[in-house]
Structure formats: structure tokens, C-alpha cells
Image (tube, helix red, strand yellow):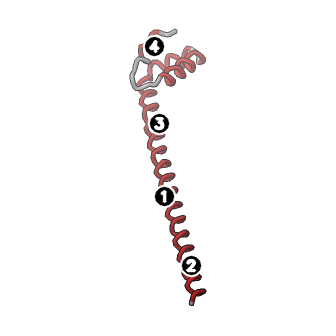
Amino acid sequence: MNTVLEKLLENEILSEKDKYEIRQIFELVDERKKQNILTNFDKILLSITKIKQELKEQQEILLWKAISNVENAIRFARNKGIKHATTSSIQDLKKIL
């Protein structure tokens, strides 16, 4: 295992999964690309961090949309139920009158 890579992977920003995947990729590429990874590791780390942040933001947006959809469905069901109950009450009153 490359000791320089292991030293770079000590970064706390990376998850164990990220570290594992970087190691796997590192072992598969040729020497030129390995050197490129080591030389540009800060840029790679910045890209990983940016992608993770964008994914987190998208997840939050999707979660809020889902919550909004559920709230709208509940409101619709309540309104439909109230309308149905009101209509039934009117029908019952017509029968009585």
C-alpha cells in the first residue's frame, strides 16, 4: 500500500467508505494516474466535499417536497371529507323537510 496515499487518507472529511473506494481505484490505475491522484489529492478532496454537499442539499429539497406532498394530501382528504359530510347533512335535511 502506498504510504503517501495512506497519509492523505487520514483526513477526517472522508468516510471509511470513501477511503476504501479511493484505495480500490488507486490500486487499479497505472503509475502516472497514481502520481496524479497523489499530486491533486486536495483538489479531489474538494470535489468530493462539494459533491457530498450538493447531494445533501438535494436530499433536503426532496425531503421537504415529500413532506409538502403529504401535507397537501392530508388537506385534500380533510376537505373532501368535510365536503362529503356537509353534502350528506344537506341531503338529510332535505329529506326531513
Report the Cα–Cα distance between label 4 and label 3. Answer: 22 Å
First in residue order: circle 4 vs circle 1: 4
Q: Is mark 1 on a helix, strand or loop?
A: helix
First in residue order: circle 1 vs circle 3: 3
Label 2 is placed on what type of residue? Thr
Q: Measuring from the top left, give residue 61's x and y in whole percent.
A: 46, 49
First in residue order: circle 2 vs circle 3: 3
> Which residue is at a point 58% across and 82% down the rendered structure image?
92
Report the Cα–Cα distance between label 2 and label 1. Answer: 24 Å
| Quadrant of the drawing holding the C terminus | bottom right
> Which residue is at a point 46% across and 31% down the rendered structure image?
48
Mark 4, mark 1: which one is toward the viewer?
Answer: 1
Q: Mark 2 points at which residue?
A: 87
Foreground residue, 72 or 35? 72
Mark 1, mark 3: which one is toward the viewer?
Answer: 1
Q: Mark 3 points at which residue?
A: 51
Mark 2, mark 1: which one is toward the viewer?
Answer: 2
Foreground residue, 76 or 45? 76
Label 1 is placed on what type of residue? Glu
Q: What element carries label 3?
A: helix
Q: Mark 4 points at which residue?
A: 6
Foreground residue, 94 or 80? 94
Q: Cβ–Cβ below 8 Å for labels 2 and 4?
A: no
Q: Measuring from the top left, give residue 55's x and y in whole percent.
A: 48, 40
Report the Cα–Cα distance between label 4 and label 1. Answer: 48 Å
> Which residue is at a point 54% across and 22% down the rendered structure image?
21
Residue lying farthest to the front in this orientation: 96
Q: Cβ–Cβ below 8 Å for labels 4 and 1?
A: no
